[in-house]
Amino acid sequence: MSYTRLTLNGPGYKYVSNTHTSRVYLKGKERNPKRERTPEEMERQNARNRALKVQLLILGNFKEGWHVTLTYAKEARPPDAEGAKKQLKRFLERAGRRFKKAGIEFKWLAVTEIGSHGAVHHHLIIEDINKEGFSSQRVIRECWGGGKYFSPMYEDGEYQSLSEYLVKKETKEDVPGCKVSHSRNLIMPKKKREKMRGHTWLSDPKVPKGWELVKESLHNGINAFTGLPCQSYLLIEVKDASKHIHTFNNKDHPPVGRNGPVHSRNGDWRQRGYFERQG
């Protein structure tokens, strides 16, 4: 007997997904009937897939970084998301030239949001770079003319909540331009698909030496569409603890709580990090 394991590997992380094929019969377990997906279920699954993609991009590229919210003065707001996208592009080009001049690679991930009252703003993820007189934070301050809110990258659960928040932004408004985008130089996860020997997997996965299980990520359940068991979880490399996302990389970070989305359980985001208004 065997099952299929899909592993997404990146710098300091492994995302594991175990599944049975429809041809597998699990002894002693009654299989739920297979059914067609509803449009709502398909959209929820697509949203989870988008959030996972963003989460792994953050883990592989921005373990020590900033979540920046870029805002406009009311009179300077672009008329729509397409206009905001053009302004964001010009800003990223200006910042990119500053990085290139300093001989530093510019990595970024961004999404545009239009709030319920028409307030257009952008969420930006960048690295926190401070070396040889160069500061990525200073570049953002000098290249963006509107408001800037900086929040240090920190979150229990290895950025799952932040990723879901960013993806929610791209589904909140059904308009062009509100999609997650990123620089082409990001390290992408590498896929490895294996046929594993054995009847099924352990509900409490065996963690390899040098790795730790992110408990919030462990899911053991039944696929609603195949009726078969499934499992997924995230592993973080322990030897990378000096650069772990639960620590700040320099003393200049403000002593705030976890970074993350504007979420009721995290309190008012204006109380975390710091905010620079226009001018």
Image (cartoon, rainbow, N blue to C red):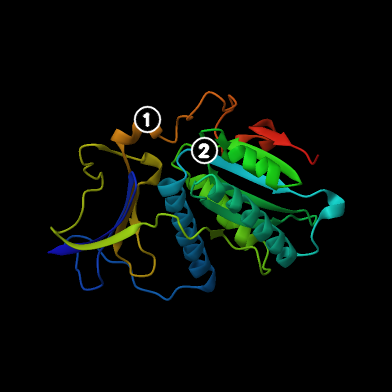
Q: Considering the image in quadrants, where does the C terminus appear? A: top right
In the picture of the structure, the residue carrying the numbered disc 1 is: 242
Q: Residue at image x 53%, y 23%?
A: 251
Furthest-right residue in view? 75
Q: Position of residue 277 (x, y in %)?
A: 77, 38
Q: Residue at image x 40%, y 48%?
A: 60
Q: Vertical placement of 219 versus 138: above or below?
A: below
Labels 2, 1: front one: 2
In the picture of the structure, the residue carrying the numbered disc 2 is: 129
Q: Vertical placement of 159 versus 166: above or below?
A: above
Asked which quadrant contains residue 180, the reply is bottom right
Of 141 and 249, the residue lying toward us: 141
Q: Is residue 262 visible?
A: no
Q: Residue at image x 51%, y 61%?
A: 47
Q: Position of residue 244 (x, y in %)?
A: 40, 34
* Number of numbered discs visible in the structure rendering: 2
Kind of residue sitting beneath label 2: Ile
Q: Position of residue 207 (x, y in %)?
A: 23, 41
